[in-house]
Amino acid sequence: MADLTWQAGAHVAALAFDAGGRLGLALGDGRVQIVRGDKRIDLACQDGAMSALVAQGPDLIAGGDDGRLRRIAADDSPAEIAAWPGQWIEHLAVDGGRVLAGVGKRAVLIEADGRQKSFLHPSTVGGVAFFPGGKRVAVAHYGGVSLWWTKPETQEPKRLAWKGSHLAVAVSPDGKYVVTAMQENALHGWRLADAQDMRMSGYAAKPRSFAFAARPNLLVTSGADVIVAWPFSGPGPMGKPPLELGGLGGPLVMRVACHPSQPIAAAGYESGAIQLVDLAGRRGVGLREGGEAPITALAFSPGGERLAFGSDAGEAGLIDLAALALDAKRQTV
Amino acid sequence: MSQVPVTVLTGYLGAGKTTLLNRILTEPHGKRYAVIVNEFGEIGIDGQLVVGADEEVFEMNNGCICCTVRGDLIRVIQGLMRRKGKFDAIVVETTGLADPGPVAQTFFADDEIKRATRLDAVVTVVDAYHIGRRLDEASREAEEQIAFADVIVLNKTDLMDEAGLRRVEQRIHRLNPQARVHRAARAQVPLDAILDRGAFDLARLAVETHVHDEHCGHDHDHEHEHHHHDHGHDHIAAAGIASVSLSLDRPLDGDKFRPWLQSLLATQGQDILRSKGILDLKGQDRRFVFQGVHMMTDGAPGQPWQPGEKRHSQMVFIGRKLDGEKLRQGFESCAA
């Protein structure tokens, strides 16, 4: 399949591939655009902005600034899962058939059967994530992160405290670390075993986008003019310098994504450029030279053979990585 | 990329903020506003973009400057940027009890907000009938909202006689000699007096030739006299807000002035709400203009001095615990 680019017509807030390979784009004008091959369908969901989109098996789950959470089934029919009028649904995570949504100061866990459980925080939720296995969740807010077990009806959360505003959260694949993006051009991490704090700083902008690579064990981050990757193997990143990968000699990395199985990461730049880097060999290859606006969304397909991107100005594209992989193989043989 | 102008609308509950906001939203001015409100329900106009925000204040630490910002505004404005092109300007309504400092600082402290928006002006609606008593009680919020304002809408003037209004205007003027005061009844003030003011725009400050201080008078149309060593300050209450105006007819040494101002704001920035200056720096053909909110300042070259023009420097500080004499000595020690 050849590369494909198009104009989606509005800011691309999020991208997600479902298990069947269908691509969804959450757009700033209230649409969710569905892409199958070279065919596109627009679902006009509301007048405001769509702000979050994640895949759940064959479905897409979309959050909007209208406070509604929608499930878009494999046949593209949207159905409302829940509604919280007056709230913005900007943070979503999934685990199996369950969805975790940030709703104002609450994180709401919606079970596969529709039952809801609500976790309340002292301030607005900045990010949500499931632990691997899904028995626990991490919720970022002012002053740190709260960890909640998903089962008990009543509980006190474990609080990971660090002063400031936390804007996104992720849990490492081994469940040993929790990392947040902060208002102050830095990431903060906690090693859960001993509650050790980790401060990952030195960024030129907020490292809002970050992801754990499947292998090697690296945290790949945005916010600098190169891809900054922190080593998380062994005792963790304390005292170790990060790897600096890729880079275009100026523009900042706005979004990163990690390949689902290979030691490969993708970076989307503020210039609209897109770059693929080999996390092991550290080589970089350019996939897009630039565009009208910063990259705002980036995602690998479930098999890792395609990379989708979207920009602040509504530029969108699907890049075929299969041809590239063949080239790489030829080079390494 | 063009920056979206942001007007901050503040004032006590009942002063007429909502009336003014409804006028901004309904009058035919051809502009589309996104409005960020603290309480839903008071305004409800079909087809308008109205977003709720909780007042969430936190301390941000960027390098050596520590400042308090409104996280909810950062979040909501960034969210609104997804809908770029759907609105031309933003109005932020604050509650009557809100501190305007963190609101203003938000537009200086966050890089992404700074790129996407520009703070146009802080507009404070004052109830002419009740403000006297609020100030007698040394209400911290009432003083701060006046002290922070670029524009003051003195509302409910129909409930006062001329002498009473003059007294109120004088008190406002002593708290904040910088602000433009517009009398109004039922918030009937021309919208172009409050919108698109460019009050934080250095380029606009740069074409002004003097700082409006308490010696100017309200209407700014009489002759100004700038005395040597002229300064004034006026304490409303012992712990309350005051303004200090400084002027100097000898040129300043930029290498002395900058560290003095920096150290002043680093140590007293929490108490200095607003600062503004139009300065004669030695060796410079143009005025140097600057303005600040607490510890954050912004400066640039302004209008050239004309041949034969009497050069001088002027500064105004508005804040708490200001020692006028010490400020004057510090300022004068920066003379070249």
Image (cartoon, rainbow, N blue to C red):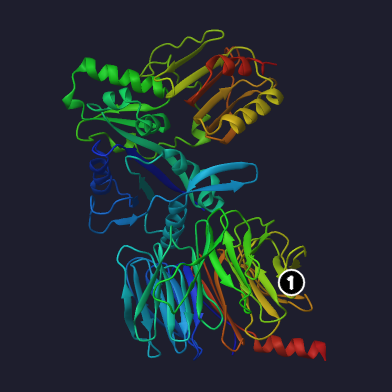
Tag 1: residue type? Pro
User: Subunit of mark 1?
Assistant: A
**What crowding class fits label 1: few (fewer than 14 Cα within 10 Å), some (14-19), or many (20 or more)?**
few
Residue A112 versus residue B205: which sits nearer the camera? A112
The number of numbered discs placed on residues in the rendered structure image is: 1
Which residue appears at 29% of the width and 37% of the height?
B12
Residue B2 versus residue A113: which sits nearer the camera? A113
Q: x%, y% of residue A288?
A: 64, 73
Secondary structure under the numbered disc 1 in the rendered image: loop
Q: x%, y% of residue B228?
A: 56, 7
Q: Please give the residue where the numbered disc 1 appears in the rendered image.
A: A235
Which residue appears at 65% of the width and 16% of the height?
B251
Vertical side of B335 occupied by B292: above or below: below
Vertical side of A132 occupied by B242: above or below: above
Q: Which quarter of the picture shows residue A65?
A: bottom left
Q: x%, y% of residue A12?
A: 48, 70
Q: Is residue A251 visible?
A: no
Vertical side of A133 occupied by A68: above or below: above
Q: In this view, does A331 lie to the left or right of B31?
A: right
Q: Which quarter of the picture shows residue B254?
A: top right
